[in-house]
Image (tube, rainbow, N blue to C red):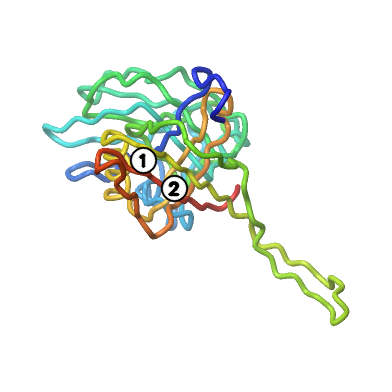
Amino acid sequence: MTGEDDMSAWAKIKFFWETMLGSVGSSLVATTTATGDYLAAYIYNMLETNMWKAANTTAPMYLTYDAGSGNTKTADYLAIIGHNLNTIGATITLQYSTNGSTWSDAFTGVAPSSDNVYLKEWTDPGAKRYWRLRIAGTLSAAPYLTLCIWGSKTELDYATAAFDPYEQEVKAAVGMSQGGYVTGVHAQYAERSLDLKFEDADSTLYNKVKTWWDTSGLKNFFVAWETANNPNDVYLMRPEAKFSNPLINGGLYRDITVGLKGRKE
């Protein structure tokens, strides 16, 4: 990915972790929520153990964010994982408003091509008080979202050392006989790994990484290693617990290493 490659044709690595959802003084309200443990707030807790689910198929339906009186927020991405939007025939868009009554589309409504992770980027229209996810279409079943966040992306840089964006390890229990024969395999899940290195990084890049670490911590977040040619390679991952990025060249630069792991969809 480095060396002789023409890097102008490649996109830089991006982290999608910053979200307005859950900000101080804000609210998130769904127009419909199924009976049971399906709170709208679950879509931004960055855990895959619960979800929001609609009570019906009456569309359009909305998840509406209000930053609160006197507050405004910006957004240039939408990321979703753990959903049924393709299966049920939904079309989605993110909308924004300054007054909560007149809305504009951040992007033209799209129908996700699968139920896998979905990422959409656009040019930030500026800070707005109100944002909402619009789910439309003739829905065949009630929609659900496990994780769905929007906010401002963090664009890093090109990695300076080789890495495999498809590295993975199958977590499995393998039974072996005394003679060394495989007697059974119980595969549990596959885990992705991304080991990113940014050598001779300046303070601008380091501050982006440190802000992510200090704010997001060990939580899950979305990462895209190259969106120009590999737009579907968006993963939900979490960082390793150690944060160490040593100073070099008399303290002018740093060698940054970010180790990430995450369950493969």
Amino acid at circle 1: Ala
Residue 253 or 9: which is nearer the viewer?
Answer: 253
Residue situated furthest front in the rendering: 250
28 to the left or right of 260? left
Q: Name the spot of residue 47 as percent of width and height, x first.
A: 43, 54
Q: Name the spot of residue 181 as percent of width and height, x first.
A: 87, 73
Q: Crowdedness of circle 1 by 10 Å Cα count: few (<14), some, many (20+)?
A: some
Q: Are marks 2 and 1 in contact (CB under 8 Å)?
A: yes
Q: Name the spot of residue 164 as percent of width and height, x first.
A: 60, 42
Which element type, helix, strand or loop, lies under badge 1?
strand
Which element type, helix, strand or loop, lies under badge 2?
strand
* Residue that carries the numbered disc 1 in the rendered image: 30
Residue occupying image coordinates x 45% and y 28%: 12
State the mark number for residue 143. Answer: none
Residue occupying image coordinates x 85% and y 82%: 178
* Residue that carries the numbered disc 2 in the rendered image: 52
From the image, state whether disc 2 or disc 1 is nearer to you. Answer: 2
260 to the left or right of 249? right
Between the residue at mark 2 and the residue at mark 1, the CA separation in whole angstroms equals 9 Å
Amino acid at circle 2: Trp
Q: Name the spot of residue 92 as percent of width and height, x first.
A: 48, 27
